[in-house]
């Protein structure tokens, strides 16, 4: 595919900064928790939970949250802080049927403080509706507390920058199995109903996946490391030859090195190029955030392209799509672009280009790219047939009927 792009006329000064590290406090607000638990018990047909049982639920939730966020500087407390910024996890509010939780925003980099994460306690009746009265009380409490903690960790995750699509960014999911991920994404905290997460998965202790950990490295006050946040350079970088070189920073909480660039398109047809090195056997994951950050950016419909060390187009995509066990095949999430684990077959310099799906669009974006270490990849049995059907083994792979969406050349 050939496109013509105007030279960049509006650029951003290059600067390097890091998040100001200061741990965050998360207050577990159990106001009206007992009332909502009573509604849950009535709906599920079980005996109301006693005061000691409620304390056990809270102790289990506290333990699970500390396990889930153990690699991060998050302090959970049941005592309301008397001053300063803090996240609030609320257990006593009501939500519409079928809704387990709600966050204030998707706050990538955690730039907004004092957000609220709501856990709609009364809506968890289906976790224990297989029981009667006092039957298997230990199992009831275990299932409920695990479900409560997982949802609390999930909603807090949104408020510090995570999106549902991030759960697909695990090492076993690559373009070869985008069409059938076999539920691998549902082991992670930010998975949800639309990713295929079911009750059994919610009752298991989930953790953060590789891409979730990459994003959390940039969450202000959350991460113990402070990788730099780069700005788009003022010098021309509107072609493969003039691409802005990025140095990827090794992360301590996952096997990845990453870089984050804050940029923007100021002219119709503008395209920004960014280069970095990768080794054969590694994979490349990249995310453009614009639409999802519309509370602080001027958003636009993004298009992202990946070029090889020989300047060949390897992969190109526009929207982020997912539904259950498919990624970037069907479903609609946002007009932002997300590449997951593009295989690196040749050591050298790779280049990402960010542009607008509609050439006249303008706006701001944040580009996050990560290089993951070499690893074995699980491919479903149906993968080969799917790839043959779409033609990847002999040429271009088209992942969506939308124009220019999801093409890969091996």
Image: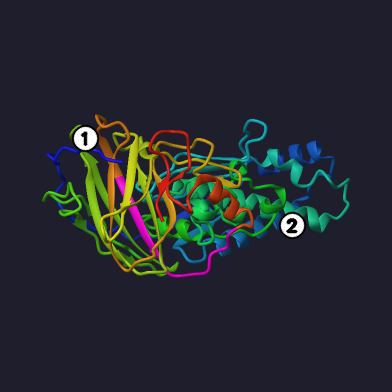
Return the disc, 1 or 2, that comes first in the chain's sequence.
Answer: 2
Query: Which of the pair 357/386 is nearer the observer?
Result: 386
In the displayed structure, would residue 358 be above or below residue 12? Answer: above
First to last magenta residue range: 366-379
Q: Position of residue 66 (x, y in %)?
A: 56, 62
Asked which quadrant contains residue 17, the reply is bottom left
Q: Secondary structure at mark 1?
A: loop
Q: Quadrant of the N terminus?
A: top left
Tell me if residue 222 can be seen: no
**Badge 1: how crowded within 10 Å, few (<14), some, or many (20+)?**
many
Q: Which residue is mark 2?
A: 142
Q: Is residue 233 left or right of residue 117?
A: left
Query: Which of the pair 291/335 is nearer the observer?
Result: 335
Q: Is 53 contained in the magenta span?
A: no
Marks 1 and 2, how far apart in space? 55 Å
Query: Which of the pair 350/94 is nearer the observer?
Result: 350
């Amino acid at each position: 595919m050939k496109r013509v792009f105007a030279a960049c006329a509006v650029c951003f000064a290059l600067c390097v900064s890091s998040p100001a590290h200061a741990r965050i406090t998360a207050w577990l607000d159990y106001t009206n928790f007992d009332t909502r638990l009573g509604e849950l018990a009535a709906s599920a047909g079980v005996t109301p939970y006693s005061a000691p049982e409620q304390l056990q639920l809270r102790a289990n939730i506290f333990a699970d949250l500390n396990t889930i966020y153990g690699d991060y500087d998050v302090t959970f407390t049941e005592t309301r802080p008397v001053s300063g910024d803090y996240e609030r996890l609320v257990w006593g509010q009501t939500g519409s049927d079928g809704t387990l939780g709600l966050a204030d925003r998707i706050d990538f980099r955690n730039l907004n403080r004092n957000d609220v994460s709501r856990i709609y306690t009364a809506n968890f009746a289906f976790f224990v509706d297989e029981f009667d009265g006092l039957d298997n009380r230990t199992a009831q409490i275990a299932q409920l507390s695990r479900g409560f903690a997982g949802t609390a960790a999930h909603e807090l995750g949104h408020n510090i920058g995570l999106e549902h699509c991030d759960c697909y960014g695990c090492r076993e999911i690559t373009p070869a199995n985008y069409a059938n991920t076999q539920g691998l994404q549902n082991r992670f905290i930010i998975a949800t109903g639309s990713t295929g997460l079911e009750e059994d998965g919610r009752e298991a202790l989930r953790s953060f996946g590789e891409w979730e950990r990459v994003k959390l490295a940039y969450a202000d006050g959350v991460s113990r490391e402070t990788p730099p946040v780069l700005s788009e350079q003022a010098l021309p970088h509107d072609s493969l030859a003039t691409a802005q070189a990025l140095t990827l920073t090794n992360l301590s909480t996952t096997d990845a090195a990453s870089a984050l660039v804050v940029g923007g398109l100021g002219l119709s047809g503008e395209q920004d190029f960014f280069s970095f090195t990768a080794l054969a056997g590694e994979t490349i994951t990249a995310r453009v955030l614009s639409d999802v950050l519309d509370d602080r950016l001027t958003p636009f419909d993004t298009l992202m392209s990946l070029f090889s060390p020989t300047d060949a187009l390897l992969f190109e995509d526009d929207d982020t799509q997912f539904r259950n066990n498919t990624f970037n095949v069907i479903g609609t999430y946002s007009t932002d672009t997300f590449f997951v684990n593009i295989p690196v077959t040749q050591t050298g310099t790779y280049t990402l280009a960010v542009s607008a799906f509609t050439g006249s669009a303008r706006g701001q974006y944040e580009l996050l790219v990560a290089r993951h270490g070499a690893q074995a990849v699980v491919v479903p049995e149906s993968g080969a047939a799917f790839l043959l059907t779409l033609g990847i083994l002999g040429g271009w792979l088209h992942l969506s009927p939308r124009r220019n969406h999801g093409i890969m050349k091996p």
